[in-house]
Image: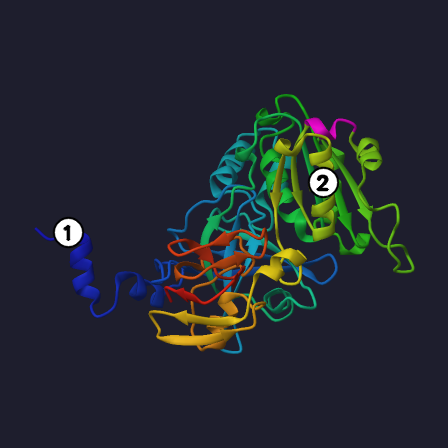
């Protein structure tokens, strides 16, 4: 006897059931062939300097995220789908439902209700915080040109920069710029647990956040309210620029400044996310203190132009053959494989374009490639992220 699903497929032929449902309402549809889903912008709220909190309604079947995870978002700009990754700053819908239940029962949730709901009380809505940058094609579009009702493509929630990735106890968030977004996602989740979050084991959380100026601080009012009302939270904001725009010499993180802001920093489970200079300093300081195992790191930046000289020296000019397409291109040794494919007119799957989401992973048939983040060499049979890899010699890829 045919299943209900097969009968429905016969009814919707020549379209798939998901495509037909999606044509009636984008949120009813399932997924596109490449695994992405379609969401709709439901609100846009300006925040900070040239930034916005954007609430998105995903499809009904979209999976729940964990606080701190990110999502690859595709936006159509000038007829081309451009994809970048953004942290989901709202807490999961199951937590929001629990908060609503506690609030309706008169529970102690005045603080956590406001914080955990973020920008929307809809159980399935997610929020992202977007800081536009001069070189950010997608971020500028979302902040300045996107409108309520616009459709977006959504990947799966991804990433292990989450509370679940570390043991319970005292926490430290060392962040800079938009690196505050995964920290805020986790802080909201902790706030939803109340005045004594169980996973802190009676401990506390310190946030040391670096920002160009106070008016560029994302979540400014919310962070201030959280620090004032939650006994387990302390927030330190360090401005990296003086009033005249010059760099603040007191802003760079050091052993002495860490001791001044958080005396037991090397004993806390630490989340590090921010600009490259802050990341480099933090990683070095924790390593020097013998506390590298206590640190979790999230990278939100392109590797282009940030590669060590010895790594670039290993890449070389030569040809790259895209086997399934039958297209060959010449490489200058510095252009990543994803860009070489796009320049050749191909459209390989991609997401973050910075080595986070793994959407672009492709098998190497022959030759060698180099990962620009760490200098590691891949050989025939390996699967590589083509957005952060360059050819070392003559290379053939399964594209």
The residues tagged by marks 2 and 1 sit, at their Cα atoms, a distance apart of: 59 Å
Judged from the image, the secondary structure of the residue bearing numbered disc 2 is helix
Question: The magenta stretch spans which residues?
Answer: 263-267
Residue denoted by label 2: 284
Q: Which residue occupies 49% across, 66% down?
A: 338
Of residues 377 and 100, the one nearer the viewer is 377
| Residue 260 figure quarter | top right
Q: Quadrant of residue 183?
A: top right
* 158 is higher (above) or lower (below) than 25: above
Q: Secondary structure at mark 1?
A: loop
Q: Please, is residue 394 above or below residue 250 in the view?
A: below
Q: Which label sits on residue 362?
A: none
Query: Which residue sits furthest left?
Result: 1
Q: Main secondary structure of the magenta part?
A: helix
Q: Nearer the viewer, residue 101 or 383?
A: 383
Task: Tell whether label 1 touches label 2 (CB within 8 Å).
Answer: no
Marks 2, 1: nearer the viewer: 2
Percent across and percent down for residue 96 are: 52, 40
Measuring 56% from the left and 46% from the top, which residue is drawn there? 90
Residue beneath disc 1: 3
């Amino acid at each position: 006897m045919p299943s209900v699903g097969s009968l429905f497929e016969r009814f919707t032929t020549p379209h798939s059931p998901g495509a037909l449902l999606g044509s009636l309402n984008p949120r009813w549809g399932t997924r596109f062939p490449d695994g992405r889903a379609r969401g709709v912008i439901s609100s846009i709220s300006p925040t900070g300097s040239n930034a916005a909190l954007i609430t998105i309604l995903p499809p009904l079947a979209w999976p729940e995220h964990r606080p701190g995870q990110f999502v690859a978002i595709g936006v159509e700009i000038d007829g081309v789908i451009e994809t970048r990754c953004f942290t989901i700053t709202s807490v999961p819908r199951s937590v929001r439902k629990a908060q609503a239940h506690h609030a309706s029962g008169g529970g102690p949730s005045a603080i956590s209700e406001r914080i955990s709901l973020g920008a929307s009380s809809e159980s399935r809505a997610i929020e992202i915080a977007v800081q536009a940058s001069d070189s950010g094609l997608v971020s500028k579009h979302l902040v300045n040109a996107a409108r309520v009702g616009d459709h977006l493509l959504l990947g799966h929630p991804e990433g292990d920069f989450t509370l679940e990735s570390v043991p319970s106890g005292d926490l430290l968030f060392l962040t800079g710029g938009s690196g505050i977004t995964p920290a805020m996602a986790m802080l909201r989740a902790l706030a939803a647990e109340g005045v004594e979050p169980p996973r802190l084991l009676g401990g506390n959380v310190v946030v040391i956040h670096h920002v160009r100026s106070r008016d560029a601080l994302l979540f400014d009012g919310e962070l201030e309210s959280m620090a004032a009302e939650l006994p387990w939270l302390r927030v330190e904001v360090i401005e990296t620029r003086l009033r005249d725009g010059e760099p603040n010499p007191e802003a760079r993180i050091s052993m002495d400044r860490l001791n001044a802001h958080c005396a037991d920093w090397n004993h806390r489970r630490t989340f590090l996310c921010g600009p490259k200079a802050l990341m480099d300093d933090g990683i070095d300081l924790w390593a020097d203190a013998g506390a590298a195992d206590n640190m979790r790191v999230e990278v939100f930046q392109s590797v282009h132009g940030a590669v060590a000289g010895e790594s670039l020296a290993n890449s070389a000019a030569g040809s790259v053959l895209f086997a399934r397409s039958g297209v060959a291109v010449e490489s200058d040794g510095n252009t990543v494989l994803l860009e070489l494919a796009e320049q050749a007119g191909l459209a390989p799957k991609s997401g973050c374009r910075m080595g986070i989401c793994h959407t672009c992973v492709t098998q190497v048939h022959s030759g060698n490639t180099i990962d620009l983040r760490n200098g590691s060499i891949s050989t025939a049979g390996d699967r590589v992220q083509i957005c952060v890899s360059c050819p070392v010699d003559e290379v053939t890829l399964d594209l």
